[in-house]
Structure formats: C-alpha cells, structure tokens
Image: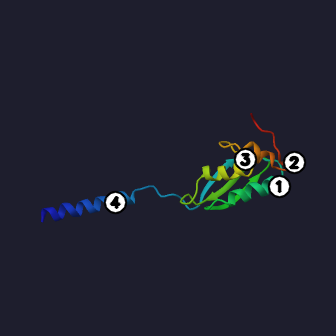
Amino acid sequence: MKKYVVLMLAVLGVAFTSQAQEKKSKNAKVDIEVKGNCDMCKKRIEKAAFGVKGVKSADWHSDDQMLHLIIDENKTNSKQIEEAVAKAGHDTKNIKATKESYENLHGCCQYDRES
C-alpha cells in the first residue's frame, strides 16, 4: 500500500510540473526595426514576413522603420522573420541582408546602409 501511495504522489508531481511550463502566446506582438524607403519596400518586407509560418499580421512603416507583427510564438520567432526579411534585401537591427540581395533591390529601395 505504501508503494502505491508513493507512486501516486510521483505521478501527481510529474503532472503538476508539466503544467507549470511556460506557454507561448498565439497572438504575441513583436516589433522589428527594418531598413527601407518606399511603398515597394513596404510590400516586399510585409510579403517576406508573411512568408514565415506563424505570422498573422505584418505592417511596416517607413516613418519609424518598424515592422509591427502579430505572431504565433508556437510556430515562429523574431529571428526567423528577420532572416526572411534580410533574404529579401532589407537589413534588420540584428541581421544584415547579403550584398547581393541588397543590390537586387530597385534603385529607390536601396536605403543608406550602415557599415
């Protein structure tokens, strides 16, 4: 009987600790700094963001150079989105686009790059 009680307490302990794990949000708000200039940039940046599974909303503003997102954190994270945007030719705060992808941008979209 004593073994049965100890076993039940162990099972309950495991059940409670697994419930205590941090749950990720399905509607997390994330802001990412993205370099760009114009409406063509806006379309390209937002399209790159929407290409990442788990992005529910993407809105880039040229005035503050910010990409405002709503994401499902169970499916993606800001690093994956920054990588997709950089692949499209736009620098983010943490990831720079390759020289080749930047040079493939239209002339009006080639923003001033920091060295």
- Which element is circle 1 on? helix
Whether residue 37 sits left or right of residue 91 in the image: it is right
Q: Identify the residue position indicated by label 2 in the image.
A: 108
Quadrant, the C terminus: top right
Residue at position x 27%, y 62% in the image: 11
Q: Identify the residue position indicated by label 1 in the image.
A: 40
**Location of residue 63 in the rendering, given as x and y in whole percent from the top left corner:** 79, 47
How far is disc 1 from disc 2 in space, using C-alphas?
A: 9 Å
The extreme right residue here reads 108
Counting other residues with Cα less than 10 Å from the Cα at mark 3, is it few (<14), some (14-19), or many (20 or more)? many
Q: Identify the residue position indicated by label 4 in the image.
A: 16
Name the kind of residue labelled 2 in the image. Cys
Q: Are marks 1 and 2 in contact (CB under 8 Å)?
A: yes
How far is disc 3 from disc 4 in space, using C-alphas?
A: 42 Å
The disc, 3 or 4, on the residue closer to the chain's N-terminal end is: 4
How far is disc 4 from disc 1 in space, using C-alphas?
A: 51 Å
The disc, 3 or 1, on the residue closer to the chain's N-terminal end is: 3
Give the mark toward the camera: 4 or 2: 2
Query: Is residue 64 visible in the rendered structure shown here?
Result: no
Q: Identify the residue position indicated by label 3 in the image.
A: 34
- Which element is circle 3 on? loop
Name the kind of residue labelled 1 in the image. Met
Name the kind of residue labelled 3 in the image. Val
Whether residue 57 sits left or right of residue 3 in the image: it is right
**Location of residue 56 in the rendering, given as x and y in whole percent from the top left corner:** 65, 63
